[in-house]
Image (spheres, rainbow, N blue to C red):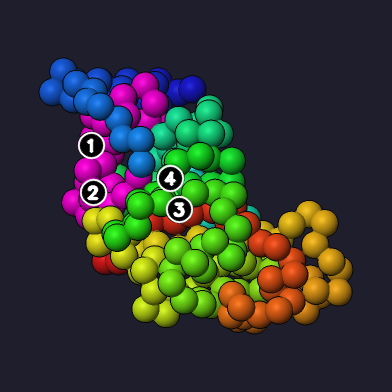
Amino acid sequence: MSPSLRHFACLFCVTLATPALAQGPAPTVLDCTGPFARTADERTLAQVFGAANVERADVPVGEGNTEPGTVIFAKDPAKRIDILWHDAYSRPNVIIIRNGSTWPVAVTGLDKPVVNGTPLTEIEAMNGKPFTLTGFGWDLGGYANGWDGGRLEKPVGGCNLSVRFDPASDAPGDALDKVNGDVEFLSTDRAMRQTRPVVIEIELGWPQ
């Protein structure tokens, strides 16, 4: 590492470790308040999760591309959270809970949170009505494009919720062939149901 990079890294560590950022109680359920509120920044993350658990990294955004962002618990897949920002490490754009991360996400009016591993049929029941998702087998496959006025339109705090599904590893090949590709399907689609999709990624997003 060059002297200039070492100097920058040390400045970043000092900034996060300032006594004004004493760590408070970390949340057990995520939502769009506190460290992920519309006006939050990287210093807020350090205050809540601990400066040692917050680091800058290139965050994957699909199709082999990355964007500069922040990662919480980067070395612990079960606790990892990726964040992309609207500004220079302030104002969250997208909070990503990837496959393997066990963080639950709270939804207004629901006692049960959204978590990775939840079956499509259960997500539909939580939403209170069918919803639309993209077909599988491509970089943006399996994403719920909207909740069609259902309950999942309202994660706690007022941001937007999106989830990504993947079919079961032993999904019937004929059913999977029918729901592959850049096409939209209803969650009630027969072939889609036969592939037994489960949530593999959760995103909380703040528009500009």
Real-space CA distance between mark 4 and mark 2, rounded to the nearest whole angstrom: 14 Å
Q: Quadrant of the C terminus?
A: bottom left
Q: Is 208 within the magenta?
A: no
Residue 50 lies, in percent from the top left, at 31, 24
Could you tell me if residue 94 is visible in this image? no
How far apart are labels 3 and 4 at the CA level? 6 Å
Residue appearing at x 54%, y 49% in the figure: 116
Q: Residue at x 19, y 21 (%)?
A: 22
The local secondary structure at tag 1 comes to helix
Please name which of the two marks, 4 or 2, marks the residue nearer to the observer: 4
53 in the magenta segment: yes
Q: Which mark is residue 33?
A: 2
User: CA–CA distance between discs 4 and 1?
Assistant: 20 Å
Identity of the amino acid at label 3?
Answer: Val
**Residue identified by numbered label 4:** 104
Mark 1 is surrounded, within 10 Å at the Cα level, by few (under 14), some (14 to 19) or many (20 or more) other residues, namely many
Query: Which mark's residue is nearer the viewer, 2 or 3?
Result: 3
Mark 1 sits on what residue?
A: 44
| Part of the protein shown in magenta | 30-55
Q: Quick one: label 2 or label 3, which is nearer the N terminus?
A: 2
Judging from the image, what secondary structure is the residue with disc 4 in?
A: loop
Q: Which mark is first along the chain, 4 or 3? A: 4
| Mark whose residue sits in front, 1 or 2 | 2
